[in-house]
Image (tube, coloured by chain):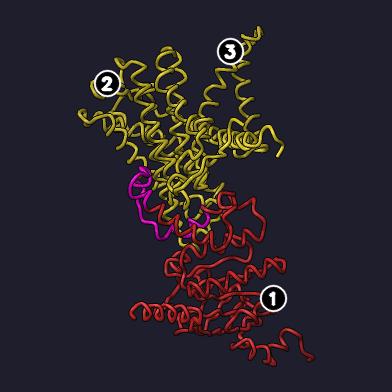
Chain colours: A red, B yellow
């Protein structure tokens, strides 16, 4: 009887995980304005990111999408507005502090450590969690090795998950583009972020690689419940995988809603297709 | 055929992450250690030990130190000579102020003092990079030598500005001073170098090493995955200077026995930099290869003409040495920026396939 009950519990748990019910607001961007000299990159942008959701930020070139991500992970400091992350308002924050609070990201142009192997790249994602001091590391045997092995094990899960076992010891500079993108995703995942910012994860990929990447993004979202904010130009992908879409144009927010609502929005259509003046 | 890891299966992560995962490498390592610990003391005479092996070991430590900073953490430094001088003078002050202090503690404390000095001169690295940082570390080089020249306290008010190592012993055997035998000096240094090299290797394969390489390869991405740039760079400066300080102390106490500040001038900084460029940036093995190369090259150039029966005047030979150095550095920078260590690695990869083409 109890076994049956346990099984139902497990089933419910896994169903709940797969339904990945979108939870509360985990990150709230409020009235952000950012300018470089006279250029206004972002004007009064506000939106919310909810737990476990996939949020896409779209817009034409130069709309301020990457600037928005750079503001979220502390790379740019906006002149106005505030960001509330997990209930804490943060002022200007350095990127490494944002990373330690659970915001990871990948880049539009791959930003891997070229001289290191794929495994080492992914292991750097766990650096913030590794505590052994320099002396212990110089000795290696004992606590440093134990810690190293624990994190290696976790990284091997990610390697397994992203299907890059064959290249784990290859220097990433030698890997093809699609593989490098995967390693970069792996490095971001290794940090076990609660928000993952993906800057054009599918740029420059062919259809198969895009499908693989979509699968990884959806699987990560499903299995780990990671909240995702992604920038993507492929509308098919955006409409398929995202729960909500934020549209930017010239640094302003045009629309914010479900893919269907955004698709029907007249302003968005005008921004993308142009409008007679 | 000979060098292949086929059939060597790793079943645990710790087996996969050992320093020499391939059996042949382990054999090679133990053979090298056997030669260093048994064959060299038995067969190399005092002359070879004093002119080649002792300076080789001392400069290897300095090269490892600079390699940690420049090759792994990507921070170019021209202050190596200054840091070595700091180590030498710190060791001298410690040894003369506390005569009962064991030489091991003298060296470690001298290294720690140099590490503090290194941190101080490493602070600009947060703001400036590459070429500009090299110039900032050049300031360390000149300032430190000036300091040891001008402040008589550092030389215990010696009129000539020369410091001489007091006789010191370990386990009742003298390793410094006139009574020390070359073999004793050699063994002491060899143990020291082995421990320091293993520690360096362990650090660069641990998370601190990954943080250094991340900062070297792309500092922005490193920061975005949570690596603190300031702490990481300063740790690199501290540990690098620790090694350089011990090298300086060993140079003054064990190799020459007495030095003046000028022994650690800018030429020394450049020589160590050449060692890691030729040996291989970002490789502990490369530090040894580079040190060996730079020490053996002048010996080779002096003796080669005689062996070939040519009679070249001494001054031309010493000029040739400089020219060959220059040519080799340009050659390595163009052809193989990762140095002898990379050539060795390429050779190993070729051996894995040999005799098949692919």
Number of the front mark, 1 or 2: 1
Q: Is residue B311 left or right of residue A132?
A: right
In magenta, the rendered stretch is A120-146
Residue, x 52% and y 75% (percent of image)? A222
Give the mark nearest the N terminus, 2 or 3. 2
Q: Tell me the chief SS of the magenta region.
A: helix
Q: Are marks 3 and 1 in contact (CB under 8 Å)?
A: no
- Marks 3 and 1 belong to one chain: no
How many labels were placed on the picture?
3
Residue A39, quarter of the rendered image: bottom right
- State the CA–CA distance, disc 3 to disc 1: 69 Å
Image quadrant holding the N terminus of chain B, namely: top right
Label annotation for residue B172 = none
Magenta stretch encompasses residue A123: yes
- Residue indicated by mark 1: A234
Magenta stretch encompasses residue B200: no
Q: Secondary structure at mark 2?
A: loop
Q: Nearer the viewer, residue A51 or A154?
A: A154
Q: Position of residue A146 (x, y in %)?
A: 36, 51
- Residue indicated by mark 3: B303
Residue, x 60% and y 80% (percent of image)? A242
Q: Position of residue A51 (x, y in %)?
A: 47, 80
């Amino acid at each position: 009887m109890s076994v049956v009950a346990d099984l139902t519990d497990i089933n419910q748990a896994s169903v709940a995980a797969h339904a990945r019910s979108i939870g509360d607001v985990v990150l709230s961007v409020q009235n952000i304005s950012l300018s470089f000299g006279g250029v206004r990159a972002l004007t009064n942008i506000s939106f919310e990111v909810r737990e476990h959701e996939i949020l896409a930020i779209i817009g034409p070139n130069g709309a301020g999408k990457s600037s928005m991500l750079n503001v979220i992970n502390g790379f740019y400091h906006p002149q106005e507005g505030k960001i509330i992350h997990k209930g804490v308002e943060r002022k200007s924050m350095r990127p490494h502090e944002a990373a330690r609070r659970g915001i990871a990201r990948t880049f539009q142009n791959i930003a891997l450590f070229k001289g290191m192997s794929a495994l080492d790249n992914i292991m750097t994602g766990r650096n913030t969690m590794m505590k052994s001091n320099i002396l212990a590391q110089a000795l290696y045997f004992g606590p440093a090795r134990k810690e190293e092995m624990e994190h290696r094990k976790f990284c091997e899960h990610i390697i397994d998950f992203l299907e890059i076992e064959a290249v784990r010891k290859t220097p990433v500079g030698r890997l093809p583009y699609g593989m490098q993108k995967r390693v970069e995703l792996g490095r971001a995942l290794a940090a076990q972020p609660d928000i993952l910012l993906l800057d054009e994860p599918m740029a420059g990929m062919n259809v198969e690689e895009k499908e693989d990447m979509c699968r990884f993004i959806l699987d990560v979202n499903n299995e780990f419940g990671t909240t995702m904010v992604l920038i993507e130009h492929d509308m098919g992908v955006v409409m398929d995988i995202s729960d909500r879409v934020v549209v930017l144009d010239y640094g302003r927010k045009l629309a914010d809603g479900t893919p269907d609502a955004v698709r029907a929005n007249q302003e968005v259509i005008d921004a993308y297709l142009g409008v007679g003046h | 055929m000979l060098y292949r890891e086929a059939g060597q299966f790793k079943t645990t992560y710790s087996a996969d992450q050992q320093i020499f995962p391939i059996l042949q490498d382990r054999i090679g390592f133990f053979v090298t250690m056997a030669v260093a610990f048994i064959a060299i003391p038995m067969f190399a005479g005092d002359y070879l030990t004093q002119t080649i092996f002792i300076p080789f070991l001392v400069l290897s430590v300095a090269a490892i130190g600079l390699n940690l900073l420049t090759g792994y953490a990507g921070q170019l430094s021209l202050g190596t000579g200054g840091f070595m001088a700091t180590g030498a003078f710190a060791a001298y002050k410690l040894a003369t102020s506390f005569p009962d202090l064991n030489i091991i503690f003298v060296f470690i404390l001298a290294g720690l003092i140099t590490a503090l000095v290194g941190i101080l001169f490493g602070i600009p690295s947060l703001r400036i990079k590459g070429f500009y940082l090299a110039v900032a570390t050049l300031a360390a080089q000149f300032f430190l030598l000036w300091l040891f020249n001008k402040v008589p306290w550092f030389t215990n008010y010696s009129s000539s500005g020369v410091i001489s190592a007091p006789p010191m012993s370990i386990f009742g055997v003298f390793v410094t001073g006139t009574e020390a035998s070359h073999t004793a000096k050699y063994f002491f240094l060899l143990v020291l170098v082995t421990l320091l090299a293993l520690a360096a290797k362990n650090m660069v394969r641990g998370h601190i090493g990954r943080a250094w390489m991340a900062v070297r390869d792309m500092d922005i991405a490193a920061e975005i995955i949570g690596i603190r740039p300031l702490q990481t760079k300063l740790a690199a400066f501290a540990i690098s200077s620790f090694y350089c300080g011990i090298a300086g102390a060993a140079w003054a106490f064990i190799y020459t026995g007495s030095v003046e500040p000028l022994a650690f001038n800018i030429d020394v900084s450049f020589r160590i930099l050449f060692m890691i460029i030729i040996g291989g940036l970002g490789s502990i093995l490369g530090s040894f290869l580079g040190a060996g190369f730079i020490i053996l090259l002048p010996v080779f150039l002096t003796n080669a003409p005689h062996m070939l029966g040519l009679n070249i005047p001494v001054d031309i030979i010493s000029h040739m040495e400089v020219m060959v150095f220059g040519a080799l550095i340009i050659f390595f920078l163009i052809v193989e920026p990762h140095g002898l260590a990379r050539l060795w690695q390429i050779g190993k990869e070729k051996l894995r396939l040999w005799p098949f083409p692919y």
